[in-house]
Image (cartoon, rainbow, N blue to C red):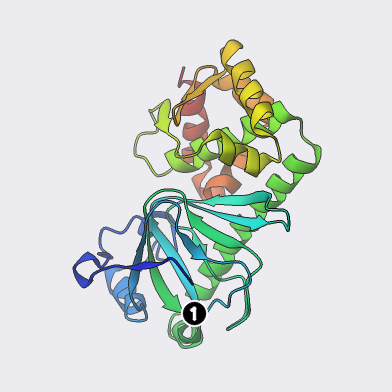
C-alpha cells in the first residue's frame, strides 16, 4: 500500500468526536462499545489529496474506516483510461471486498485530505465474536454500497448525459448534506472537478462541460470552482429521476427514518 502517510501519535483520531460514529461502522454504539472496537485498531492514517490508500493488484489486509475527508474508488484500463466507481464519504468502509491477503481489483484515492482508522482483517473474526452485531453493520454498509454501484452502472449504461450528471451531483449533494444538522443549506463545496465527473459518468470533459453549461442556462444548477448551487430543486430531482426510496438508499436510512428523509427531500426542494 504505497503512498500512505502514517499519522503521528498525537494525531490519533478521537473516537468520541469521530464523524464516522454518525453513519459508519461505529454508528449507534455506546461509548464503551466504541472503546472496545477501538482496541482492535492499529495506526490511523492521514492522506493528502491525490494519494492512494489502495492500489490495483496489491494485497489488502485491513479494513479502513473513513473518518474524515472524501475518497473515490477507481479502476484503470490498459490504455490509461480511468473509471471512477464511486465516491466515499465519512463513514464509508474500504478494504472489506477481498479475503485476507487477496489482491484487490480497484484503487482508492483521497479526493481531499483524508483520515482513516485501520482494523486488520485478522482481527475481524475475534471482534465479530465478541460483538456479533458488528458483522451485520458491515453487511448493511456493503449493501448500501452495492445499491449505489448498481445505480451508477445503470447511469453509465442507459441514462442520457444530462441524466447521469444531474443524478451524480444530486447524489453527492444529498449524501453530504445528510451529515449536516438542519438540512437548510442550498450550496456546498463539492471537491470534484469536471474530470472526476467525466470519469464517474463515462463522459468526455467536453461533454461534461457542455451539460453543465446547459444545466446552468436552464437555471437548474450552477457548478463552478468546485461549488455546487442547486437553483431549481424540483427540476433537478425530475431530471435525476429521484424518489423517496432512492433517497433512503443513498443515505442508508430505513423506514423508521422516513420522516427525516422527507424533510431532507423537502429541504432540497426549498433550496432555491
Q: Residues within 10 Å of mark 1 (few under 14, many from 20)?
A: few
On screen, residue 229 above or below 249: above
34 or 14, nearer to the observer: 14
- Residue 107 x/y as whole percent: 58, 62
Q: How many marks?
A: 1
x 57%, y 46%: residue: 250
Q: Residue furthest left?
A: 10
Q: Does 35 sit left or right of 119 as displayed?
A: left
Residue 99 seen in render: yes
x 62%, y 60%: residue: 143
Q: Quadrant of residue 73?
A: bottom right
- Residue 106 x/y as whole percent: 63, 63
x 45%, y 31%: residue: 226
x 40%, y 73%: residue: 118
Q: Does 118 sit left or right of 150 as displayed?
A: left
Q: Does 87 sit left or right of 23 as displayed?
A: right
On screen, residue 212 above or below 251: above
- Residue 254 x/y as whole percent: 55, 51
| Kind of element beneath mark 1 | loop
- Residue 230 x/y as whole percent: 50, 22
Residue 245 seen in render: no
Q: Which residue is mark 1?
A: 132
On screen, residue 203 above or below 152: above
Q: Residue furthest right?
A: 158
Q: Residue furthest front?
A: 79
6 or 118, nearer to the observer: 6
Amino acid at each position: 500500500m504505497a503512498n500512505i502517510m502514517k499519522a503521528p501519535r498525537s494525531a490519533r483520531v478521537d473516537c468520541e468526536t469521530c464523524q464516522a460514529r454518525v453513519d459508519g461502522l461505529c454508528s449507534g454504539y455506546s461509548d464503551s462499545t466504541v472503546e472496545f472496537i477501538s482496541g482492535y485498531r492499529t495506526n490511523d492514517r492521514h492522506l493528502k489529496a491525490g494519494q492512494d490508500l489502495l492500489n490495483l493488484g496489491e494485497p489488502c489486509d485491513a479494513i479502513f474506516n473513513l473518518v474524515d475527508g472524501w475518497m473515490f474508488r477507481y479502476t484503470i484500463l490498459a490504455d490509461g483510461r480511468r473509471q471512477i466507481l464511486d465516491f466515499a464519504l465519512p463513514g464509508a468502509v474500504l478494504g472489506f471486498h477481498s479475503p485476507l491477503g487477496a489482491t484487490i481489483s480497484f484503487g482508492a484515492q483521497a479526493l481531499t485530505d483524508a483520515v482513516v482508522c485501520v482494523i486488520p482483517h485478522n482481527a475481524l473474526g475475534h471482534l465479530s465474536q465478541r460483538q456479533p452485531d458488528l458483522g451485520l453493520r458491515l453487511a448493511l454498509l456493503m449493501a448500501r454500497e452495492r445499491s449505489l454501484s448498481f445505480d451508477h452502472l445503470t447511469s453509465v449504461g442507459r441514462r442520457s448525459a444530462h441524466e447521469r450528471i444531474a443524478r451524480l451531483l444530486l447524489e453527492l449533494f444529498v449524501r453530504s448534506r445528510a451529515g449536516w444538522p438542519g438540512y437548510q443549506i442550498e450550496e456546498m463545496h463539492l471537491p470534484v472537478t469536471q474530470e472526476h465527473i467525466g470519469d464517474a459518468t463515462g463522459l468526455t470533459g467536453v461533454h461534461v462541460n457542455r451539460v453543465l453549461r446547459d444545466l446552468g442556462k436552464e437555471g437548474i444548477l450552477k457548478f463552478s470552482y468546485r461549488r455546487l448551487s442547486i437553483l431549481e430543486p424540483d427540476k433537478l430531482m425530475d431530471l435525476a429521476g429521484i424518489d423517496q426510496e432512492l433517497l433512503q438508499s443513498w443515505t442508508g436510512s430505513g423506514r423508521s427514518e422516513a420522516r427525516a428523509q422527507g424533510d431532507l427531500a423537502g429541504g432540497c426542494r426549498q433550496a432555491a
